[in-house]
Amino acid sequence: MTHSTPKPLEGKVAIVTGASRGIGRAIAERLVADGAKVCITARTEETLTEVASALPEGSVMVVAGKSDDAEHREAVMQQIAAKWGRLDILVNNAGINPVYGKLIDIDLGAVRKLIEVNVVSMLAWAQAAYHHEGLGFAEHGGSVVNLSSVSGRTPSPGIGMYGVTKAAVMHLTTTLAAELGPEVRVNAVAPAVVKTDFAKALYEGREEEVAAAYPAKRLGTPEDIAGAVAYLVSPDASWVTGQTLVLDGGLLAAGGAA
């Protein structure tokens, strides 16, 4: 008689924002593989549906909308409550970087949008996950992982304001962890350049040259990030909170910048 090994996230329910492609998609796929049911959100329903179609039936719920829209967040909570009746994990992956250039010349309207999506909406999702009646982490605990970036640790040419928001994400993470323990754990991951459409401007056409600055001699993959997130939301990380796990192939250790 064979006994199947329980999956680490069996019975858990997660939200992954910005899950239609790249890192967000890989995180959703990994959490499903580890036994969780996952609500995936992003702006475009068509791409979300494509992600869901590649995963086991019943394991994924699709709710399209903008991460910085309060009505969208409430719709996600209501649909999870109706279908699954619980929420255990929030992965704040949605983020934007609409500008490239020096901070001193950046359009201030773009700055406000960056802060709204990359910082304010992360806090708003955490608030929603914590306070929602019947689902909320305040009632039964939970785990949050925020997506930061190595650009929040050291200046990165051309993406300075993005880096400022990602530094804010790190401090948001530690502050929430200090406030919400022991019931809720809050951590972050800070990748360097990962091979996604979002990061193409940082490596396209010169991948070998960019990767040469990394001791690991390669860029990151979405699966690299998904594995770290899966660890942070798992029982194996039950004593880990307030941390930002840098995922950079050794780039910062070697004195580099994204």
Image: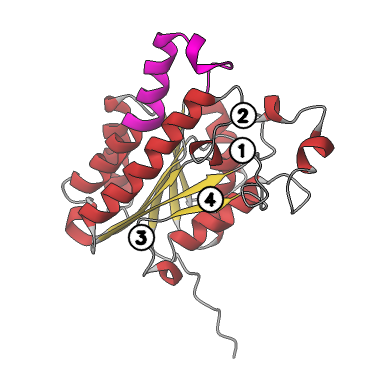
Query: x, y (%) of residue 67?
Result: 38, 29
- Report the predominant secondary structure element of the magenta stretch: helix
- Contact flag, marks 2 and 3 (Cβ < 8 Å): no
Label 2, residues with CA under 10 Å away: few <14, some 14-19, many ≥20: some
Identify the image quadrant of the N terminus. bottom right
The residue identified by callout 1 is 22
What residue span does the magenta drawing correspond to? 97-120
Report, in whole angstroms, how far the alpha carbon at label 4 lies from the one at label 2.
Answer: 28 Å
Left or right of 162? Residue 196 is: right
Query: x, y (%) of residue 34?
Result: 52, 62
Helix, strand or loop at label 3? It is loop
Left or right of 115? Residue 137 is: left
Q: Amino acid at mark 3?
A: Thr
Instruction: Judge whether 193 appears above or below 160 on screen.
Output: below
Q: Amino acid at mark 4?
A: Glu
Report, in whole angstroms, how far the alpha carbon at label 4 lies from the one at label 1.
Answer: 21 Å
Report, in whole angstroms, how far the alpha carbon at label 1 lies from the one at label 2.
Answer: 8 Å
The residue identified by callout 2 is 198
> Which circle, 4 or 2, is nearer the viewer?
2
